[in-house]
Amino acid sequence: MPKEAKQVPVYLFLGLLESGKTSVIKDFLSSNKFSGRDKNLIILCEEGEEELPGALIKRSRAVTEVIEEPEDFTAEKLTALNEQHKPTAVIMEYNGMWKISDLDDIDLPPGWFVFQVVAVVNAETFEIYQQNMKDKFVDCYRYADVIVFNRCDNSTRQQDIRRNVRAVNRRAQVYFESEDPDFFEEEPELPYDFEAEVIEVGFDDFGAWFIDMQDHPKRYEGKKIKIAGFVGKIKQNNRIFSVFGRSGMSCCADDLTFLGLGGVGSVYDDIQVGEKHWGTVGATMYVGYAPNGEPNDFRLQIESFTPEKEPEDTIVYFR
């Protein structure tokens, strides 16, 4: 019987040149997470303005390898590095100008698995790149588990950034980092009163509600809400789900994402799979939690539904 390959976690770092990936990798190597590893393999796919200190590499029991050209980043190359170094963990700093989707076509060596994807963004240049390199940014957001915005100051538009991220990736954790001792992370400024007996969310405020609902689920547990969107039924994995929501867009039509949650109530009785009925719902919101205490299910008990004509512009914009 062939010997089972040992499990090797891969930590993938994404970001454009000079975004600060190397600084974040330094923090990773300095953490206790890697102190007990037998051997770390660091794969660098670009050379930034900052280098990893040799003393840190040695202390981390790491070796570095450089892959400069995208055509050299192949399954065969990774397999050769695995056989040469036999790492117990891999840190991969991916070139920000390469297509991230190409990673899906590359078979990792036996035992290697992507444990965490970290995207790093320079907050100082965020808006410029967001306007001129949208596709690259959207790719980083879509694949990341964690997104670090560094070089922040108190002029950083934190809520606009969160909206852009959540429009394409609702599971990513977003962190803002700064060397400014006066920097603080903002609480969301909501365009409605979430402490009201009935929370009334305006049509243009759907995005703000959707993001705050995920960031602060306990605020909404058991709360009454009045909000516009569509009710419908979808079929996934041979199961039929009743849903309420809208579609959101970060930068282009290709990035349309359903923003919504499950629904229950008599409004769904006569709705067929694939149908969408626009209107304003009056509902009570419920939050379900996983065994670890994390919210994992948002649901509306719809008590009233007022049909309305589908708006000319139905999209939730994040910008």
Image (tube, rainbow, N blue to C red):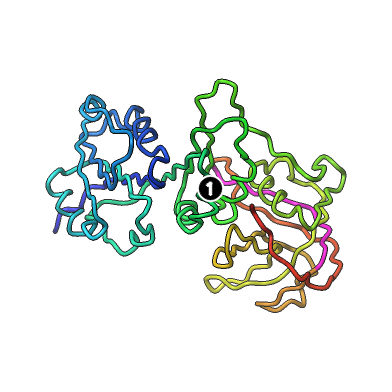
User: Is residue 174 rendered to the left or right of residue 3?
Assistant: right
Main secondary structure of the magenta stretch: strand
Q: Position of residue 110 (x, y in %)?
A: 22, 55
* Tally of numbered tags: 1
Q: Residue at x 58, y 67 (%)?
A: 253
- Quick one: SS at disc 1? helix
The x and y percentages for residue 115 are 37, 47
Query: Within the image, what quadrant is residue 56 found in?
Result: top left
Lateral position of residue 278 relative to residue 122, left or right: right
Does the segment drawn in magenta span residue 101? Answer: no
Quadrant in the picture for residue 44: top left
**Left or right: 164, with 3 as reference point:** right
**Residue 63 location, x and y as percent?**
19, 37
Residue at image position (75%, 42%) is 190
Point out the image quarter for the N terminus: bottom left
Q: Which residues are magenta?
A: 279-291
- Comparing 256 with 4, the one in front is 256
Question: Residue 104 or 137: which is nearer the viewer?
Answer: 137
Residue matched to label 1: 128
